[in-house]
Image (cartoon, coloured by chain):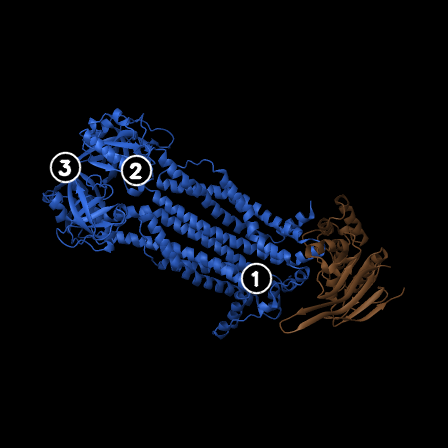
Amino acid sequence: MNMKIKKVIGDLRINPGRIVLVITALVIGLWGAGSILVSYTILSRDLNENFVRTNPPHASITSAHLKLLDMAALRSRPEIETVEFRDFATLRIETHPDEWIPLWLFGVEDFSNFELAGIFDQDGGRRPISPLDGAMLVERDGLKFSDLKAGIPAHVRAGGRVVSVPVAGISFDPAQAPGTQDHLIYAYVNKKTFSEITGTPADQRIIIRFKNVRSKQDVQAAADGLVQHLKTLGITVESVKIPKFMEHPHQWQLNTLLFMEGSIGFLAFFLGAVLVSQLMAAILARQVRQIGILKAIGASQAQVLQMYVAMVLALGVISGSIAVPLAVRSGYSYAYFVADILNFDILTSSLPHHVYLYLAAASLLLPILLSLPAIVKGTRISVRAAMSDYGIQQETVAAKTGIVKVLPLSRNLVLAFENTLRRKKRLAVTVAAMALGVAIFNTGFNVQQSLKELLLDVKNSMKHDVQVVLINQIPKEEVLSYFSGIDNISRIETWNGGRGQMQNMIVSTDAGVGIIALPFDSDLIAFRSMKGRWLGGPGAPEIVMNQDAAVMFDHPTIGSLHTLSVRGKKLQATLVGIVDEFEKPKIYMDKELYDSFSNPDHRVNSLMFVAKDRSFDKVMALQRDIERAIGPSDLQVLYVMMQAERVKIIYDHLKIIFITVVFFALLVLVVSAIGMASATGINIMERTREIGVLRAIGATPKTIFSLFVAEGMIISAISIALGLLLSWPLSIAAASMFGTLMLEVALPYSFSMTGLVITIITTTLFGWLASRIPAQRAVSVPTREALAYE
Amino acid sequence: MSKLIQLNKVSRWFDTASVRFDALKNIDIHIEQGSHVAVVGKSGSGKSTLLNMLTGIDHPSQGRVTINSTDVHTLDESKLAAWRGRTIGIVFQFFQLIPTLTVAENILLAMDLVNTIPSGERESRAKALLAQVGIAQHADKLPSALSGGEQQRAAIARALANDPPILVADEPTGNLDSKTTKIILDLFTELVGTGKTVIVVTHETVSNTNYDRIITLKDGSIVDDTSVNR
């Protein structure tokens, strides 16, 4: 074997602890960044791929007169790519005994021959089985939070009736928002069963894909044209629904995750890079004298360079061969985790070649590129300088810090301070890397706090305990009579209008936004105002929008006049405010105003219950009492929901982001902590001879040990202080970006005291471990050996 | 005999923050091929700086260094390394063997780096060199397994690896007992007998029985240059 290679191998073997540290650091850095790359590659393709393979419709049109349609003629229209009947009804289903949640029931025209809004069998591979008359397929995500399963009958409440519908099988509909997050079940039946369950005729809703459309505006124009055409056929359209153009309903969650992965992955990568370059600089520092010897016996700079590049390459190969398989595995695991939460299938069975190329390049080239400056610097050293290298130079030892000297510190602590400042460049890199880790870790908690405060806002913005939403509007006195026998009711406030995302098909404006009509001075609502003010008075022609509606209407100005249309009746009202609400687009108006133009009989369709005893158990009991009161009645209920459950739904939407934020932030902290550990280890190793001198002049191992641990603590303290300072603007930026991605509005900055405590404890612990372990090793070296150390 | 080494008006100074320190002052030394020269002086006399000039480890601030017809002071670092490998073998006070390689591998490394000995001959040459310095039995041991004297002999074998005409030894016996010192100095004498030029730098008092010439330095200047007639 070539002696140059043999020397490289020998150098790698001479200090296994250090090499293990370098390889560990490289493996963690590569593993982290690689996992992110792998999962990013999979997730950025697969959610959309899942969505697209359903061949999602561009729009749906609802009308009681669609039976009049000649579907063949409609399909032959030039703007139509394909069109099918796909009836839809919102019912309720019993998920556990006495627990009812919304059921979205789809009536499929022909299970064996549909082209649009495809559904699959449970495994996502083939078309689902065709359920027999009277039976239904349940979407697989619903199984995660219900007792429903194939072969058993499900209880469906349609209007005042409870229908037993056997679950014929389990289906998979990747185009829908995950049922677990929206707390609803999706089910699919044939047309006949749809009519039987709902009590309404089938063929009242068509789903359409248009040709040559590239945006929602194109779809809107095509849909408008189609509506006009239907009018000429005598078909009055009740509603047109246009979802986001070719985008999964929960794409925003994935976008948030991918953004987070991308940004934190970059930072982890950056920290890993700093770590590698630092470790390589340390290895070369140890090799300076040997470089001198090599040159003295005839080695050229290029030869020395080759040997150290080969050494780094060997480290890269070892690290890469460990990290890449781990990264692929964990990247897939994370992708599967996200896919399970968002209810889609991982379709990427093999990664694109470029991913492996990037991973290989990161494994092999990155350590070389990062250590090249240190290698070049190390190998350029002259023989004379190399042969007289004794580690830390005299002049740097002499550096003094005036502030430290005047502080009332023990001699040992002053020495620790001065030692910490000896290698200023390394200290700066170590502190910068650690501070960045601290900043990101703390930012993770602060962003989480911003999200928690958003949840708290949600909780505080609606002060009722239980909400009952009816499908139909009913006279107030009649509906209240059903609940008169329930004890734990302090009061019931009645509202009307639209009822958010699940109901805005029934009462909606032309743009499909929900309208909530409530007493302008209701104390059950307290949104945070973003612009303008809340509704001003009884009957005033004013509206307030939530921020999603404001986005939908392209950020209208306060004071602008808007025309609302509900069931063909129109009203002009002034926009007086925009409120912060984590909900689908909604418009709020005074109930008197709503009644005056659309509801002359003062009917209601929402009941807001406030309990006397508002403890969780009592409110749960109240919800059950309400369900029992509804049971025998002929009330057609859309849903009964506790306020706590509403908050939970939102929490479930954010949970994955909570978990990921902290996981990735911790990853960054671990990488930077390893960086700090290595830097501390290097510092201590380089001072082995000094340790020998200290011991020779009487310092006990305990004194030396405490000196090094104090140095680690000082670095931790500086890093924590800088990191927390840095986390402030970082948290503001991150909250703003997350808010914009999720809610189209910046989240306010929040400070997490828990995060602060955890950050300080974790970082201090890392700092302590990072100095304690090498310090322990250093003091265990016999004085004689320490003095002889070069 | 021809002049193998010529130092003409060589000075070397180091500028510090406050003063200029003159390590060598206007030195003229001419050394013939096959000489056995001792450079002696106390600490700070300039002998290590002189050694650096002879080996191309350092350049003069002023003057010319010509060795084996090469103007050493004109070579860049890369050319110097190759030149040094071919022309000069260096023996250090602390042996400076590569601790991760065996004794034989240390010699092979020197040959691999310079690449003047055909690769097929390197192993046999390494063995022959180790036999020449009397430690053939330790060829496959790591340096740490050898005594100080054995390590120094291994270092001499390494210095001879590429068959350089000049051997420069920096305090080669500074770390050795008197018995081992004699062995090493006898070895140098043997090498001179084979035509090598051997220059030993030392702070110790030297016996004129070992050397052809003794150059004494003090404060960067030659204060004595004695040739010993045999």
Where disc 1 sits, the SS reads helix
Q: Which chain is brown?
A: B
Taking the image as shown, residue A187 lies to the left or right of residue A7, namely left
Label of residue A46 in the image = none
- First in sequence, mark 3 or 1: give its number: 3
Compared with residue B46, is residue A483 higher up or lower down, i.e. above or below?
A: above
Compared with residue A685, is residue A495 higher up or lower down, i.e. above or below?
A: above
Label of residue A684 in the image = 1
Mark toward the viewer: 2 or 1: 2
| Separation (CA) of disc 3 from disc 1 | 80 Å
Label of residue A218 in the image = 2
Taking the image as shown, residue A56 lies to the left or right of residue A336, namely left
Comparing A656 with A502, the one in front is A502
Q: Which chain is blue?
A: A
Compared with residue A604, is residue A770 higher up or lower down, i.e. above or below?
A: below
Q: Position of residue A418 (x, y in %)?
A: 53, 68
Q: Are marks 2 and 1 on the same chain?
A: yes
Q: Which amino acid type is shown beneath numbered disc 1?
A: Ile
| Separation (CA) of disc 2 from disc 3 | 43 Å
Task: Name the residue tied to disc 3.
Answer: A634
Q: Is the N terminus of chain A in the top left, top right, bottom left or bottom right quadrant?
A: top right
Instruction: Specify few, some or many for label 1: CA neighbours under 10 Å numbering under 14, 14-19, or 20 or more.
Output: many
Which residue is situated farthest in the right direction here? B230
Q: Is the C terminus of chain A in the top left, top right, bottom left or bottom right quadrant?
A: bottom right
* Chain under disc 1: A
Residue A139 appears in the rendering: yes
